[in-house]
Amino acid sequence: MSKSVRVRFAPSPTGPLHIGGLRTALYNYLYAKKHQGTFVLRIEDTDQNRFVEGAEDYIVESLNWSGIPYDEGPGKEGDFGPYKQSLRKDIYKKYVGELLEKGNAYYAFDSTESLQEMREEAESRGEKFAYGPQNRLSLDNALKLSSEEVQKRIDSGETYVIRFKTLPAQKLFLKDEIRGHIEVDTSVLDDKILFKADGLPTYHMANIIDDHLMEITHVIRGEEWLPSLPLHVALYEAFGWDAPKFAHLPLILKPNGKGKLSKRDGDKLGIPVFPLEWTDPKTGTQAMGYREGGYLPETLINTLALLGWNDATDKEFYEIDELIHRFELKRVHKSGAKFDPEKLKWFQQHYLQQADLDGLVAEFEEILKEKEIQTQTSYTKEVVRTIRERAVFVSDFWDLSFFYFASPQEFDKKSAKKAWKSTTSDLMSEFVDFLSTLNDFSEENLEKEVKNWISSRDLGFGKVMQPLRLSLVGAMQGPSVFHIAASIGQETTLKRIHKAIHHFSE
Ligand code: GLU
């Protein structure tokens, strides 16, 4: 029987989570759920220089808001915790000790200054300095020192790092679930630092130890980690562990396809690149979020799912369960995925139509409250039901429906010119007289009676309907005028027509 699927999302809390990171989380989640597996959140916080206050909470909140809940992780302890690398320091020490013992790693004492000098010297020759099989024996490390000497230097408090001893000129055969087979010659690899002078493991070290100990079966992560794959596989081999399967996801590109989608691109397009709003704790700079921008989580999930994957159909909208059902790593694209702002808007409009009506009403009621509009929930619900198809965001509701709640403050000039001619005021006065005789002001009856009245007078339909709409709405917009009139009621309808007559007679 094959092992049960365990995948992980392993962000470093160095700032807000980019939507590219959220997509990685999503694909991991989809893969886990499709295979009845486990989705782990692991916080990779061993680089203390890059630690940012609040970033971990931000990651957790982003996953929760987007509807990508993790099964194990901070606050959801399972059998493989702790799930934060800063709480696992002792574990890494033990394993690096194992590599030292086996001769796969070594102490190196080279000072930052001497390395910098060598780097500059190489650059001046137009070369790149690498610490590796070709030069390591001439550098300041345990490979050329006796073990007593090494111990002495350590005991005397000298700073050191621990480096991986890359095997010289070996061929590594790697496989990526999306990209296929990759062959790497280890002579291109350098001896990466596994343990830093501050006594903490580097990303590479902690990452593969944790993937092994947490029994991760599939590493699904961004393409930017592909260059690290040879080192990771070499580390698995050095430990004698089975490596998980790897899948590297394509980049999310700017709409024009030229380079990675950045915060600056987002600002230019007016589109967030982060799930939630973020305020940088040091600089105070703000970044937009999908949530605060009024997007629904479903919109973001559908957008991200289709940025780099499809199921070979033309289907454009997915519910999360369908995504779980249809998701396959082999259908993830190799090349970068262009972000399409128009599609995002279209998806948002679609999901707004699908959203729970009561939820939308509750959100709109908040907006109405701010505007000090008193109204009944049942009334607001009927309004939202009527106008939502024209909206992209809940924040559009007011502009689409203000006339259900308040008299228009002005009459749109262009509409007025078209709808209100010199004879219109007299006609509308007669129309008001007629409307005030109606006992049944329901939408259906109103429509029937008004149509009869217009035809009995042999008038064009627009002659009455256009000034009526202008009176009620202030412009040539909005849903059925009969619906508006019936909703605001007979008295308000008559008042608004009077007001228009008065306005245009001045
Ligand atoms: N901590 C790495 C990151 O911030 C994780 C990379 C990986 O998934 O291996 O993206």
Image (spheres, grey):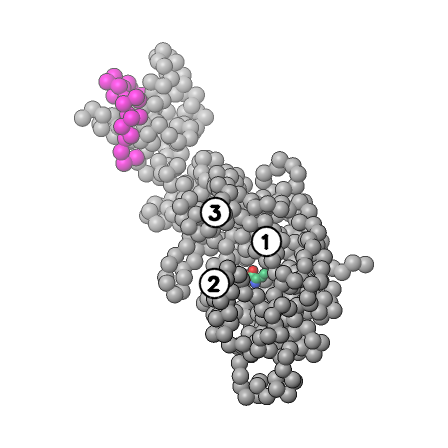
Nearer the observer: mark 1 or 3; the answer is: 1
Nearer the observer, 230 or 144: 144
How far is disc 3 from disc 2 in space, using C-alphas? 51 Å
Q: Position of residue 185 (x, y in %)?
A: 68, 59
Where is the C terminus found, in terms of image quarters?
top left
Residue under label 2 = 124
Ligand 1 falls in which quarter?
bottom right
Nearer the observer, 56 or 397: 56
Residue under label 3 = 295
Identify the residue at image location x=39%, y=31%: 478
Where is the N terminus found, in terms of image quarters?
bottom right
Q: Position of residue 476 (x, y in %)?
A: 35, 27
Q: Mark 1 or mark 3: name the one nearer the start of the chain.
A: 1
State which region is magenta: 408-431
Residue under label 1 = 223
Q: How many residues crowd around disc 3 within 10 Å: few (fewer than 14), some, or many (20 or more)? A: many
What number of labels is visible?
Answer: 3
